Amino acid sequence: MSEGMLCTKSHEYILEQGGGKYIIGLTDYAVEQLGDIVFVELPEISSTFAKNESFATVESVKAASEIYMPISGTITDVNEDIIANPELLNEDPLGNAWLVKIESNAEDVEFKDLLEYSDYKEEVGA
């Protein structure tokens, strides 16, 4: 699912769905570094976040990590499946284990520091 995916240096991905709608999740590299994920805390629907603002927490057997918003937007959906079964993130981070869906009218400038998935993989040495 990496086609069209953009990534942050803090290991979130964003995938445009059209019409100002986006899916946000954690990259496979981030999930691999975290190890076995045991808890996921996601925001309420309709919450609004600015770019780079922490919107979620993921805890693994190794550490707890804040997850940051790649662009500003409003939460339109949260993945209830990974709240109930956090280990799903370890199994399919770039597919069914997305974190949230947002609606955004972010300006192009907010996308400037995002990396194409292939460039991101190169940068993290994966």
Image (spheres, grey):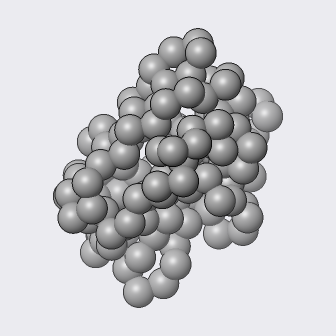
User: Residue 24: x, y in percent?
Assistant: 49, 57
Check the picture and name the quadrant holding the N terminus: bottom right
Front residue of this view, candidates 40 and 20: 40
- Count of numbered marks: 0
Residue 74 placement, left or right of 7:
left
User: Residue 6: x, y in percent?
Assistant: 57, 58
User: Residue 100: x, y in percent?
Assistant: 43, 58
Q: Residue furthest top?
A: 62
Picture residue at 41% right of the left edge, 59% below the top:
78
Q: Residue furthest right?
A: 126
Q: Is residue 93 above or below residue 104?
A: above
User: Residue 64: x, y in percent?
Assistant: 45, 20
Instruction: Specify the quadrant of the image occupied by residue 31.
Output: top right
Q: Residue furthest bottom?
A: 19
Front residue of this view, candidates 70 and 78: 78
Check the picture and name the quadrant holding the C terminus: top right
Picture residue at 38% right of the left edge, 66% below the top:
77
Picture residue at 46% right of the left edge, 55% below the top:
80
Front residue of this view, candidates 115 and 32: 32
Q: Is residue 13 above or below residue 104?
A: above
